[in-house]
Image (spheres, grey):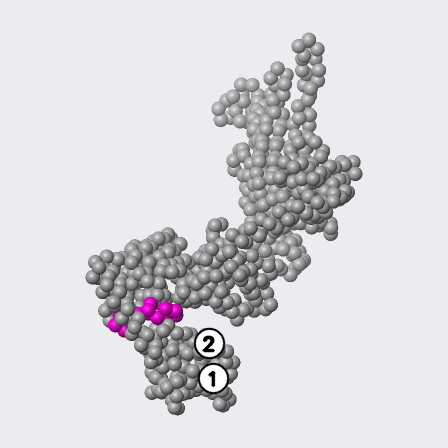
Amino acid sequence: MNFLTKKSAFAYSALAISFMAIEAHALAIQGLSANQISADTTQIKVAFDGQPVTPVAYQQAGGKQLTLDFNQVSSGGLPRSMPINRGVVNEVTALNNGSMTRLMIDLKEQASYTSTIEGNNLLVNVKQGNQVVVNPSVAPASNQPMTVRVNPLLAPTSSSLATNYEGISAFNYTGNAQGGDVVVSLTNESIPVDVQRQGNKLVIRTTGTTIPRHLLRRIAGNGLVADVNATNQGQNGVITINMTGDFEYQAYQSGSTLNVSVLPPKMLREPTLEEKVYTGEPLSMEFQDVSVRTVLDVLAKFVNDNASGNQGYLNIVANDNVQGNITLRLMNVPWDQALDIILKSKGLGQRKNGNVILIAPASEIAAEEIKELEDARRVDELEPIRQEYIRLNYAKAEDIHELIGRVGSASSTIGSANNHNSLLSPRGNATFDARTNTIIINDTARSINNVRQLIETIDIPVKQVMIEARIVNASDSFSKQLGVKWGFNRTGNKFDIRGMNGLSSSNTESRFGNFAVDLGVTATSGISLGLLNIDNYALGLELSAMQADNKGELISSPKVLTTDKQTAKISSGVEIPYQEAAASGATSVSFKQATLALSATPNITPEGKIGLQLQITNSADSGDRVLGVPILTTDEINTNVVLEDGQTVVLGGVFKNTIGKNQSKVPFLGDLPGVGRLFRNDVRLNNKQELLIFVTPRIVNDGVSRY
């Protein structure tokens, strides 16, 4: 064991010495400049301290980014970001991992490039246009990910890549029908990892490192994830997440742990109550052992570069105690989620004020908030008490008084130190005067203002609903006729109602047989309900025609006005007298009510519809008596319906069926078979009557009410 330890130490020492030797003799970039050499060409000059090397070049982002990789070249004193803003070139970003320097040239649009070497300078000419011209001095290559590292000993060298070491110590998948999470534990946080979407699969690749044999397996998924498959492809480990449909993904690395989440597209899913919804622009960023302040600065720059309007800008103020470095890799993550991940990983918190975010240790922010609450409490304790009289317009003072304190007692005074639900401070109290409908408050100015805001919200006029009912006693023939004639054609800029809306051009009125509702009755009992899409005028014509044809009568047409959510009641009937004897033997006359009663409670919805809670009771004298007390027959219905403003609901099925048989005959002769019909008169009576109730609610707009 000691031998292996010493051998490993020697290997790392040798590796470090080799890197130091490389650094000592490595070519370095001394400077970078850009000039507009023509109307469509920008020249970027990269100055070296020796003969330039041939870079590996490739284009990304649909041709809008040119990347040059210089092997065994240091970035010298180049800053990380260099704004250019000349021609088609936006800026140049320089990255270095100790053994290679990468120059990423951000372009405004697709462009072609050529390059030449002049002395110790590499000249890159970027020209507008999408045809890529390859020169011998720039060798194209496929897009390979580059990991930014601070410690060069963490970078895999060519020898280490050739020996092929294992880069994953464990990986696990958890998920459900809505997606899943893959957690990969790396043997070293510096191992290059590439996450790419390829059609309906997501590929996680560890460059230059393989997956141990015992981790090579396939994990079955369900729902969105079909399966997760871990394999080795040459010297690279590959974890493939196969999907069953469209998906989104987020990936980030914290330390040596890589987290990849797949989920349905945002338009196809609803966030849960526990899930925080992130709305920021997605970004990808990768850092190895970089200052937290630097990462926050990069994040703010990204947000401001993608801001649209003054409201989109982000300003970050970091507390002096925001220190330390962080290693992370974020891929396609909303910037606000990225900020949360960074802060949580370092034990930091945030407070937002407008477009300014203060970053500080979470414990300091919590202590500051507690201090602010304590200061506010002390101010309330010292603030003078005022008295305020608030006269109400529409609400009852007693109801508002109860809302202020939510105190369920008979006392008319609210305010105590134990009443934590009250809008008042511990020193405040409130009472009311029912005669003048006035609330009287004794409290601080802040508490009085809170009460005023509550009253402004609640003390408003309530909308009213006009409920019109038509109670019709119809014969069987008319009820059947009406059952199939519940449609009406009214023209002349009016609606044609046949189960749908239409328009015609004549000014005639007619009844027809293609109707929206059929309540033709065949049963002998029960109550049915339907909706009638005709206006008051059309319904009135139908009922007038009924009375003219002697097919029924309109018993009553009451109207009642009530406020929203208040019950209105309409009743019509008779009182049936009967004698009632007392224990002493004295008699008195009592009454039983045989009435038709309609009770309706409206509820106006925010969409302007009317919900109606209906209760209809129909009681009538059956003609039977028990000890002289009349027996009543009763039909009752309770229902809830939702109607458009002005729509009619119809309740039918309350029947009265009279069946009679009379016979007059000549004695003996009328009983003879056959010829007996000549000497007798048979009368059969079958009279059916149905009670129909039409209810039409309308919202009364008085020009003042607001909902």
Residue at left offset 40%, top offset 66%: 288
Q: Is residue 244 visible?
A: no
Query: Residue 334 appears at what percent x and percent y?
Result: 47, 62
Query: Residue 354 appears at what percent x and percent y?
Result: 60, 61
Residue at left offset 65%, top offset 30%: 595
Is 104 positioned to the left or the right of 355 in the image? left
Query: Residue 31 appears at what percent x and percent y?
Result: 44, 82
Amino acid marked by disc 1: Ser
- Under circle 2, the secondary element is loop
Residue under label 2, please give it.
Answer: 79
Query: Residue 136 appears at what percent x and percent y?
Result: 33, 87
The residue most toward the top is 584
Report which quarter residue 459 is drawn in.
top right
Q: Residues within 10 Å of mark 1 (few under 14, many from 20)?
A: few
Q: Which mark is residue 33?
A: 1
Q: Please check the rendered image and state whether residue 118 is part of the magenta-colored stretch, yes or no.
A: no
